[in-house]
């Protein structure tokens, strides 16, 4: 006997109820971990721009939220710079600019250099001197991810 529209609708409603229950479980788990909406938004940008696993993106996003909270309000470009550095890699201005473009769609090397200088002054970013200076998020210093 063929499936009736009512049967299909009932099946869709059952599946939707299961999906909603699973989402509730995920939200409860994230809340227990202290993951906020702000962290999730940042994690989504990081995961989609840099193709990193969700768990790594959430850890990076938590660094972003903590860094922004520590220095106060930042403009969208500075936040994108912090998101770029949240993976705890030492990056050059060129690489930071390339990655900010992945997040924002556009970025000027000059503007990125200006934002980096400001973030260094505010203590959120550390400049590593050398023939080609590199930058790292201050929160990453000492973390195991940097030791390779």
Image (tube, helix red, strand yellow):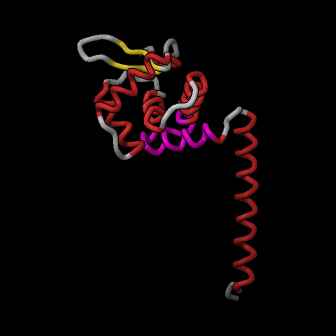
Q: Tell me the residue at 74%/59% (across/down).
A: 18
Give how far across and how far down residue 56 sits, in percent: 53, 33
Q: Tell me the residue at 46%/28% (across/down).
A: 87
Direction left: furthest residue? 131
Give how far across and how far down residue 129 sits, in percent: 32, 11
Give how far across and how far down residue 52 sits, in percent: 47, 38
Residue 119 against residue 39 in the figure, above or below = above
Q: Tell me the residue at 44%/27% (across/down).
A: 85
Give the quadrant of the C terminus.
top left
Q: Nearer the viewer, residue 26 or 4?
A: 26
Residue 45 magenta-highlighted = yes
Q: Is residue 23 left or right of residue 67?
A: right
Q: Magenta residues?
A: 38-57
Direction bottom: furthest residue? 1
Q: Is residue 92 left or right of residue 27?
A: left
Give how far across and how far down residue 79 sits, in percent: 48, 34
Q: Is residue 91 visible?
A: yes
Q: Is residue 145 visible?
A: no
């Amino acid at each position: 006997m063929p499936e009736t529209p009512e049967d299909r609708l009932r099946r869709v409603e059952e599946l939707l109820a299961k999906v909603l229950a699973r989402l509730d479980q995920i939200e409860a788990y994230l809340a227990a971990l202290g993951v906020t909406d702000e962290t999730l938004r940042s994690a989504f940008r990081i995961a989609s721009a840099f193709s990193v696993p969700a768990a790594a993106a959430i850890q990076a996003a938590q660094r972003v939220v903590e860094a922004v909270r520590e220095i106060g309000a930042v403009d969208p470009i500075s936040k994108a710079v912090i998101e770029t550095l949240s993976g705890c890699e030492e990056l050059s201005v060129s690489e930071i600019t390339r990655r900010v473009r992945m997040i924002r769609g556009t970025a000027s090397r000059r503007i990125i250099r200006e934002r980096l200088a400001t973030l260094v002054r505010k203590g959120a970013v550390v400049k590593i001197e050398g023939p080609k200076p590199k930058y790292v998020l201050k929160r990453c210093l000492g973390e195991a991810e940097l030791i390779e």
